[in-house]
Image (cartoon, grey):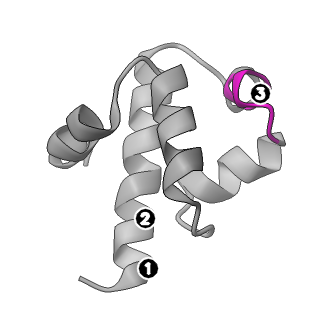
Amino acid sequence: MQDSELLKRIGCSIKALRTKKGMTQQNLSKLCKVDRGFISSVERGKRNISVLTLCLIINMLGTDFVSFIKDMDDFQ
């Protein structure tokens, strides 16, 4: 799998989880203390984020890293 494909899969999974929770990008960005544009670029697979930032985002979405990775295919 190419890096860009993985980033897109992660981004799509984050977006799916966020919308399932009824959250906007703005809501999530405030919880994570990042810019809304940052969340947008992550969801579009345009940003290579650190594992720590990924964990912060998915924790704010109510899940943990291991569950997120296991469930990634379900979000596609």
Q: Is residue 48 left or right of residue 34?
A: left
Based on the displayed image, in which of its 4 quarters is residue 41 positioned?
A: bottom right
Of helix, strand and loop, which one carries label 2? helix
Q: Residues within 10 Å of mark 3 (few under 14, many from 20)?
A: some
Label at residue 64: none
**Label 1 sits on residue:** 4
Residues at marks 2 and 1, CA–CA distance in whole angstroms = 6 Å
Residue in the image at 59% along x and 47% along y? 53
Instruction: Indicate the amino acid at tag 3.
Output: Gln
Q: Quadrant of the N terminus?
A: bottom left
Residues at marks 2 and 3, CA–CA distance in whole angstroms = 20 Å
Dot placed on the residue nearer the N-terminal end, 2 or 3: 2
Q: Is residue 71 left or right of residue 35?
A: left
The rendered magenta stretch, by its main secondary structure, is classed as helix
Of helix, strand and loop, which one carries label 3? helix
**How many marks can you see?**
3
Label at residue 8: 2
Identity of the residue furthest to the bottom in this view: 2
Residues at marks 1 and 3, CA–CA distance in whole angstroms = 24 Å
The verdict on residue 30 being magenta is yes
In the image, which residues are magenta? 28-34
Q: Are marks 2 and 1 in contact (CB under 8 Å)?
A: yes
Instruction: Indicate the amino acid at tag 2.
Output: Lys
Instruction: Indicate the amino acid at tag 1.
Output: Ser
**Label 3 sits on residue:** 26
Residue in the image at 46% along x and 33% along y? 58
Residue in the image at 79% along x and 24% along y? 30
Residue 34 spot, x, y in % from top left = 80, 40
Camera-side residue of 26 and 68? 68
Residue 74, visible in the rendered structure = no
